[in-house]
Image (tube, rainbow, N blue to C red):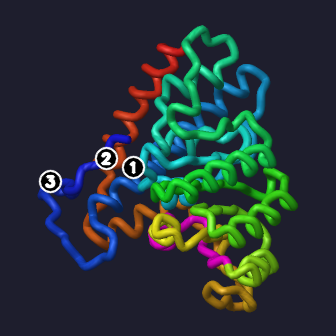
Amino acid sequence: MTKAPSTEKSPDGSLSTHTGFSLISNEKLLEIYSTMLKCRMLEERIHALGKKSGKTAGPSVHIAAIAGSAIDLLPADTLASSPSAFTPCFAKGMTLAAIFSIVMPRSTAHRPRYSALNLIPPSFSMAKQIKRALEAAALYKAQRNKKVVIVFSSDASGASSELENALKIAAKKKLPVLFVCETKSQDDDRLARAKDYHLPAVAVEDDDAVAVYRVATEALAHARRGSGPTLIECRPWPFNERGSGKRTSAKRQPAKHPISKMEAYLATKGLFSRRLKSQLIADFKRELDAAIETAS
């Protein structure tokens, strides 16, 4: 994917030179933001096309989870996107033209080969995606090639029993898998069971791409070293009192959109401006329009 620039002019026209300390480079933070913005625009365009054709989009994974965990995958790594979810495929490298050739019902454009991008087809059920993901991970472990697999899932995608079984298998065999699960539940049972399997598990705020990225970076390095799988559970803030995340007060704070949250974070580092956002939106809108025209 095209990376956002590592520096940006502020609204007054001056060039920001802010280099405040961060474990994540400014360039990477802007790349995460750019990916989130593009994924949201892509989701909106797919939804609009679906309404015209009478089709509804399948359960999707939060854009903060996608950008935070898939952005550093290598071409040879494998990704299971969850059923009918194309934004993770885009984050992995699938072109817009390829995506629209699939989602546009009367497209005559050549359809992509998922295997060429090491993608498990989103047309598969969640159970089948999990099965394929475990097969790929077992092969990577046997070959000791440091490749990894990411499995995205959500409460809406079903296959909770298959996911549970996959966690057990991956932990027992120390497979190089990162499970990224989105849930609306405040229940910690899955995290507790994962730890019972000796599988590292952590809950993160589902609209905090930076938090997801920090955990995913460690989890992917853990998997590439041959140390086995990790579970990241993305859930709404605040976490409950029993959870492994931060404690909550009795009063729930209003939810914040993940893009707005990322913009606020970038602003504290002198990296965000409305000019940056406007330019990213304008450029990607042209890419979307051109891809749809190609796929028509």
Question: Which residue in the structure is indicated by mark 3?
Answer: 13
Question: Does the magenta portion include 5?
Answer: no
In the rendered structure, which amino acid carries the disc numbered 1? Ser
Residue 43, percent from left and from top? 59, 39
Q: Residues within 10 Å of mark 1 (few under 14, many from 20)?
A: many
Q: Which residues are magenta?
A: 199-219
- Please give left or right for residue 81 compared with residue 28 in the image: right
Q: Residues within 10 Å of mark 2 (few under 14, many from 20)?
A: few
Residue drawn at the location 46% of the way across and 39% of the way down? 93
In the rendered structure, which amino acid carries the disc numbered 2? Lys
- Please give left or right for residue 232 compared with residue 16 in the image: right
From the image, state whether disc 3 or disc 1 is nearer to you. Answer: 1
In the image, farthest residue toward the front: 142
Q: Residues within 10 Å of mark 3 (few under 14, many from 20)?
A: few
Q: Are marks 3 and 1 in contact (CB under 8 Å)?
A: no
Q: Are marks 1 and 2 in contact (CB under 8 Å)?
A: yes
Is residue 48 placed above or below 249 in the rendered structure? above
- Marked residue nearer the N-terminal end (3 or 2): 2
| Of residues 71 and 34, the one drawn nearer to the viewer in this rendering | 71
Residue 125, percent from left and from top? 79, 41
Give how far apart the Cα atoms at labels 1 and 2 are: 7 Å
Residue drawn at the location 24% of the way across and 50% of the way down? 5
Is residue 38 placed above or below 17 in the rendered structure? above
Question: Which residue in the structure is indicated by mark 2?
Answer: 3
In terms of image quadrants, where is residue 89? top right
From the image, state whether disc 3 or disc 2 is nearer to you. Answer: 2
